[in-house]
Image (cartoon, rainbow, N blue to C red):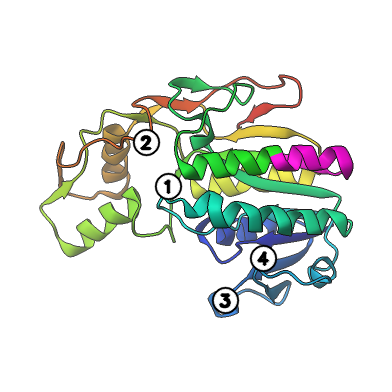
Amino acid sequence: MRVAVTGASGFIGRHVLAELSHHDVELVAVTRDPARLRNLGESVRVLEMDIATPTPDSYERLGKPDTLIHLAWDGLPNYKSLHHFETELPKQYQFLKAMVESGLPSLLVTGTCFEYGMQSGALSATMPTEPTNPYGYAKDALRQQLEYLKTALPFNLTWGRLFYMYGEGQPNTSLYPKLKEAILRGDKTFNMSGGEQLRDYLPVEEVAQQIVQLAMAQGDIGAVNICSGKPISVRRLVEQWLLENNWKIEMNLGHYSYPDYEPMAFWGGSTIGENKQNTIRL
């Protein structure tokens, strides 16, 4: 099987490449900066490409993959930026449409839990989407555009909604690397929110496993949640990290206010097998 991965040099992309290395695939890693992937083995072909400026032979340059894992998306973590639907959405759709028109048979695109908007509790993939920030809106709009495209150009589509994750290589704007940096600096306290919000977290290695599992199936699966299905408070999660790593630091709870673009309690639902739309849990 031939597999191409866009956004391959990003946080999730690197872990997806690592997971794919355990499978018998011909792998193409797509990036705008090949230097970031120079340590990959010879079994991976690194392709320099900007999806904002595809060429008529882009699908051929990708090696005519059987499956495309599409992780690329610019403008994060500024979820409120209009860039997501003014700039990112049209270029994403045009690139993916060009791939399908050229013969791509199977596509996996990562979405986001922000597509659900301010809905609380266990979020099933069969629930109506109600995005309330530009990022969630743009992702949901791309999914709908691709669903309409399928009526004209048949292809298999899996839409994997990502929840929260942590691990090595994560951007330093996220909770886990911020905590680790504070530990390495020898800080006595770690500033955070009240920590009572409930979220759905997975190690990034497990996220990569689920993405690869879905992509290798080459099915017309539709929307799925890539998640644990288990809520955990942010405070409890930080306590867990401290215990697992034998880190010593005091949590300064309540230093930051809670984000206004997400509800206090939500996580991936546990329903499996509802029509084509599922929650996948390993």
Residue type, numbered disc 1: Tyr
Inspect the magenta stretch and tell me whether residue 151 lies in it.
yes
Residue 33 numbered tag: 3
Residue plotted at (26% across, 38% down): 239
Which SS class for mark 4?
Answer: loop
Please report whichever mark, 2 or 1, sits nearer to the chain's N-terminal start. Answer: 1
Mark nearest the camera among 2 and 3 is 2
Q: What is the x, y in percent for residue 218?
A: 81, 44
In space, the residues marked 3 and 4 are separated at their CA atoms by 12 Å
Region of the chain picked out in magenta, as a range:
145-158
In the rendered view of the protein, which quadrant contains the C terminus? Answer: top right
Write down the residue under mark 2: 261
Please give the label number shown on residue 79: 1
Q: Which of the 4 quarters of the picture holds residue 52?
A: bottom right
Tell whether label 1 touches label 2 (CB within 8 Å): yes
Sequence-wise, the earlier of marks 1 and 4 is 4
Q: Distance between the residues labelled 1 and 4?
A: 21 Å
Q: Can residue 45 be seen in this view?
A: yes
Q: Tell which residue pokes out farthest to the front in this image.
A: 86
Q: Hey, what amino acid is under mark 2? A: Tyr
Q: Residues within 10 Å of mark 4 (few under 14, many from 20)?
A: many
Q: Which residue lies furthest to the left in this view?
A: 188
Residue 28 vs 260, above or below: the answer is below
| Residue corresponding to mark 4 | 51
Give how far apart the Cα atoms at labels 4 and 2 are.
29 Å
For the residues labelled 2 and 1, the Cα–Cα distance comes to 9 Å
- Pointers 1 and 3 in contact (C-beta within 8 Å): no
Residue depicted at 61% across the width and 64% down the height: 8
Dot placed on the residue nearer the N-terminal end, 1 or 3: 3
Indicate the quadrant where residue 24 lies: bottom right
Q: Earlier in the sequence, mark 2 or mark 3?
A: 3
